[in-house]
Amino acid sequence: MIFKILGGALIAWAVADFGLSYMGTDVWYDWLGIQLPEVIYRFSAMIVGVIGGVVWKLGDAGEAEEGAEQR
């Protein structure tokens, strides 16, 4: 369950990063004070989104294992 929550939060962060970057807000620097290198900054939303998706899938796998153990 915690992996799905964390994965969802990372995906939400990625969506916010992507959308707000078009509005001129750098969520990494403005909100967290982190200055990303240009090459990473350009793809930061995709990177965080992929990591969030992987974490979400880990939550799915963990729930499937729990269900199999309870049978």
Image (spheres, rainbow, N blue to C red):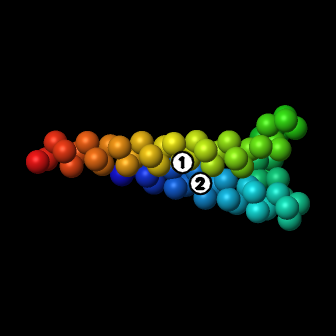
Calculate the distance from the C-alpha at mark 2 to the C-alpha at mark 1.
Answer: 7 Å
Q: Residue at the location (42% across, 42% down)?
A: 58
**What's the amino acid at mark 1?**
Gly
Residue 65 pos. (x, y %): 26, 42
The picture quadrant where one finds residue 11 is: bottom right
| Label 1 Cα crowd, 10 Å radius (few <14 / some 14-19 / many 20+) | some
Q: Residue at the location (11% across, 48% down)?
A: 71
**What's the amino acid at mark 2?**
Ile
- Which sits in the foreground, 10 or 57? 57
Q: Residue at the location (21% across, 49% down)?
A: 67
Outermost residue on the left side: it is 71
Residue 52 pos. (x, y %): 56, 47
Compared across the picture, whether 49 is left or right of 41 comes to left
Residue 25 pos. (x, y %): 84, 58
SS type, badge 1: helix
Q: Decide if residue 18 is in sight here.
A: yes
- Which sits in the foreground, 35 or 57? 57
Q: Is residue 53 placed above or below 35 in the rendered structure?
A: below
Q: How many marks?
A: 2
Q: Residue at the location (51% across, 42% down)?
A: 54
| Label 2 Cα crowd, 10 Å radius (few <14 / some 14-19 / many 20+) | many
Compared across the picture, whether 16 is left or right of 10 comes to right
Closer to viewer: mark 2 or mark 1: 1
Contact between labelled residues 1 and 2, with CB atoms less than 8 Å apart: yes
Residue denoted by label 1:
53
Residue 31 pos. (x, y %): 75, 53
SS type, badge 2: helix
Compare marks 2 and 1 and give the one earlier in the sequence: 2
Residue denoted by label 2:
11
